[in-house]
Amino acid sequence: MSALPQNPVGLAISTLLARDEQTILNDWLKAMSEGTRRADLIKESDLRSQCAQFLKLLRQASETGGTNFKAPAWGPVREMLAEVSRSRALQGFSPLDTATFVFSFKRPLFARFQQEYKGQPDALAAEMWAATELLDDMGLYTTEVYQKSREEVIGRQQEELLELSTPVVKLWDGIVALPLIGTLDSARTQVVMESLLQAIVQTNSRVAIIDITGVPTVDTVVAQHLLKTVTAARLMGADCIISGVRPQIAQTIVHLGINLLEVATKATLAAAFSTAMQRLGLQVVRETPKG
Amino acid sequence: MEKIPILRMGRFLLVTIQVDMHDRLALALQDDLTQMISDTEARGVLIDISSLEIVDSFIGRMLGNIAAMSRVLDAETVVVGMQPAVAITLVELGMSLAGVRTALNVDAGMELLKSAVNGNKQGYGASLQ
Amino acid sequence: MALLSSETLPIRAEIDVVTARRRVRDLAAHLGFSLVDQTKVVTAASELARNTIIHGGGGLMVAETLNGPRTGLRLTFEDNGPGIPDIELALRDGFTTGSGLGLGLGGAKRLASEFQIASRVGQGTKVTITRWKWRE
């Protein structure tokens, strides 16, 4: 067995891979299967080709780039790892599963080092030290990319959830209604405003009915949020009518001295709809029976 | 310095703001508009801001000033087409532009202006009660 | 890997307010901010840039794009002007030493996810706002 080069540190990796790539690949896959393999999320064949690709890029990079992961020679490896992390994040792997891709490589690699450097403790230590630093940098990098991807996925999911919970309904040409259900906190108010205003533009509605039957309590905070929504709609050129004002809420409003300005308030959605029709100069007429 | 063009449509003046306005341009518009209202004895002003992506406190104040000054010159002002993102931001800034009439678009704005000029001067805000 | 980019713009003349707005808009759009969030951060920048000129006698804006763990945009407005003697008062809506509405500082704070201000009379003022990409 030819002696592995000792200088520069790191060239050992590329030499090992050049010589034993297939067996190292198999050992690596075996090490991974002993951990959390997630066979449900990725096929054996796909995993194998990912690993093979990684080893090929690893060999090329370590030939010239030493073991400094930040060096430009490691660019292709960074890109590949980023791709792996991103797809793992989207597929639903845990962060540990994703980091395992890199960390599980230590076992077959260090086993090889121990064989090659038998009787040379200093050389063994140096190689293992350099390799550990390199693989740790890689593992951390995959975790960073993974987290970034998850942040995007979760952020988008949260947006969609919030939007789904504020449906705006077109009641008539020029009239939209927004039934609010649940508490109206700051975050929800933002979504409510966006959904309502977007609907106003899209349907060209001059009247928006905000029904608060499903809002449990109306205190000064909720009233302020409602006022913000009403003001924003008004700035765009649409008037709001607040419906579903129960007697208790009316009491609270007066009690707290909340000033709803000139916002029309109605007890029922039906009453609000009637008012809205009037505002638009529309009438509902009963058909006279024929014959 | 470029100026924002003011179009004349009968007894009304029409302004379409499409550029990213710096303060001096906004002040110039204020001046030009009041001058023109006076010169043409205009009864109404329609300001189309549907292309304005940013309305900060300075521009908001300009709109309020224009509405107030026009009123003194016996003309009504309607601001139309405010984008949703702009409306949300203005509200957060703390501006309600209470003295400014608004409408969804130019058509609705003209309707509002004509009606207002014909004597219907009830309150401010969006549609007619 | 947290700081993606950093750039400095002079805020000396009125036209710089427009330049700052455009640059902030580009950065926010590039980070994938929603339209509403873009509008908020650009408007806040407009307010603070104007303050820098009118009250601070001119200064600069530093724009940093943040990439991890959270994605966001951080803007710092700095001047060597007279400083603000009473910051709490200055943050109150309606308070102004100029001819404006006094909504600039408090408004910018409301439009931002995070807001920091440091000021010393006779030395200058530094305002930093951060807008995160996703709802908190």
Image (spheres, rainbow, N blue to C red):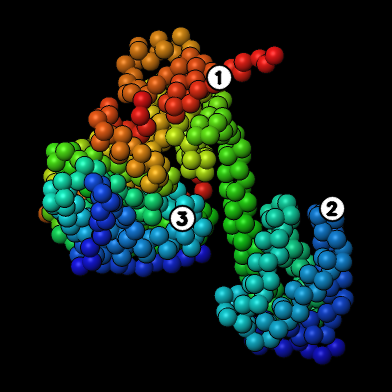
Q: Quadrant of residue A219?
A: top left
Circle 2 is placed at which residue position? A40
Pick whichever, B25 or C76, lies toward us.
B25
Instruction: Determine which residue is flagged by label 1.
Output: A285
Image depth: mark 1 or mark 3 in front: 1
Q: Position of residue C34 (x, y in %)?
A: 49, 51
Q: Residue flagged by tag 3: what amino acid is it?
A: Gly
Q: Residue at x 38, y 55 (%)?
A: B51
Where does residue C39 sit, x and y in percent of width and height? 40, 51
- Circle nearer the N terminus (2, 1): 2
A222 relative to C19, above or below? above
Q: Residue at x 68, y 66 (%)?
A: A83
- The correct choice, above or below, for A269 with respect to B92 in the image is above
Q: Is residue C110 visible?
A: no
How far apart are labels 3 and 2 at the CA level? Answer: 35 Å
Amino acid type, mark 1: Val
x and y percent of residue A193 in the render? 46, 37
Which residue occupies the foreground of this view, A104 or C46? C46
Residue with the mark numbered 3: C72
